[in-house]
Image (cartoon, rainbow, N blue to C red):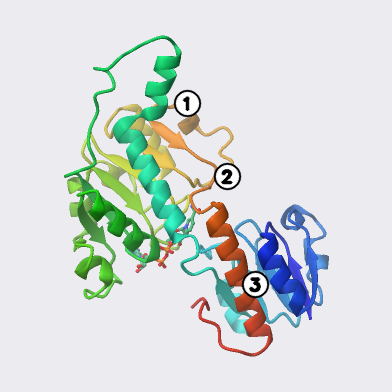
Amino acid sequence: MKIVVTELIWEEGLEVLRQMGETDYDPDLWKKDSLISAVAGADAVVVRNQTRVSRELLAAAAGLKVVGRLGVGLDNIDLEACKQLGVKVVFARNANAISVAEYVFAAMLSFSRQLDRAAEDVRKGNWNRRRFTLTELYGKTLGLIGVGEIGSRLAARARAFGMNLVGYDPYLPPYETACTEFGVVMTGLDQLLSQSDFISLHVPLNNHTRNLINKDRLALMKPTAYIINTARGGIIDEAALYEALKAKKIAGAALDVMSREPPAGSPLLELENIILTPHIAGLTEEAQVRTSVLVAREVCKVLRGQASCCLAG
Ligand code: NAD
């Protein structure tokens, strides 16, 4: 068996793959011209979110049986082409959902209590207790757009903080745990946007969700509300977001993902009321060990002809 790993994988997962077969590992292969020739003859290709698993790559890897995605979003993989060619795709279902949910809390608490700014102010010799008298999360409304693995974990944590929860997810059955156990009240998208103090996005990027949060939808938000995107760049219209933040039509935004990463030259970089992070919401040691081992094991299962619990589609 030949396995090609084109991006960063944790050692624990690599070990699992090496036991299965000859494993070529180059964390920078995704950006090299040699990518296409390197996958020739591969039975499995393991990627994160940078490698474009295109028709061209799939054609070069004739005989490919499985693509392993070390993460959740599948927008870098041509799923239709994989289906046509009989190539299975496995992904890290659930493996980094807790990390992403905790990131959203870090962002909400950063907006609500501004510890970094208060600490920086004290370091300058100030003692501004009034300036840093801010707000509680308790009693505020969190709107979840997409109530899947991450959205429901976030709901469980937000409930413990005494937040009110509203959700928008037209594909969610009404008996889902998020609604029955964590008190998420399902509503329409526009109602969610106008009611929420914090809005958090947890939908995949596809033709239905591209620019889902556009100028008109941003205009529905309260001027005191914050929006947090850990899902994918492209779901929020960044030009419209820039205008809304600059004119203080909304209070702030936290973006872990952007339409171009890194966002060199983006006007969003100039704004004060935005937190930009380098696509790290799912990146914790714990989540990466889980992701690497899970995907490696599922790739091996497919190579052995066994059923996988993490198949896409
Ligand atoms: P999931 O599949 O469990 O949940 C997605 C939910 O979105 C589903 O319940 C689905 O019904 C809903 N949905 C789909 N289309 C929708 C639409 N048009 N409107 C409203 N709801 C819709 O996925 P998840 O594990 O919760 O992950 C969500 C997304 O988060 C992923 O697709 C991925 O892009 C992103 N993600 C980012 C990071 C990061 O590091 N920033 C890490 C993990 C996942």
Residue for badge 3 = 296
Q: For label 3, count other residues whose C-alpha is less than 10 Å away and answer few (under 14), some (14-19) or many (20+).
A: many
Q: Nearer the viewer, residue 165 or 61?
A: 165
Find residue 246 and report its horizontal and vertical position in percent.
35, 28
Q: At 56% across and 76% down in the image, what residue appears?
A: 80
Residue for badge 1 = 270
Q: Looking at the rendering, in which quadrant would you find the N terminus?
A: bottom right
Question: Is label 3 within 8 A of ligand 1 (CB to nearest ligand atom)?
Answer: no
Label 3 sits on what residue type? Ala
Circle number at residue 261:
2
Give the SS element for disc 3. Answer: helix
Q: At 31% across and 27% down in the image, what residue appears?
A: 247
In terms of image quadrants, where is residue 76? bottom right
Give the SS element for disc 1. Answer: helix
Does label 2 or label 1 sit earlier along the sequence?
2
Q: At 61% across and 68% down in the image, what residue appears?
A: 293
Label 2 sits on what residue type? Glu
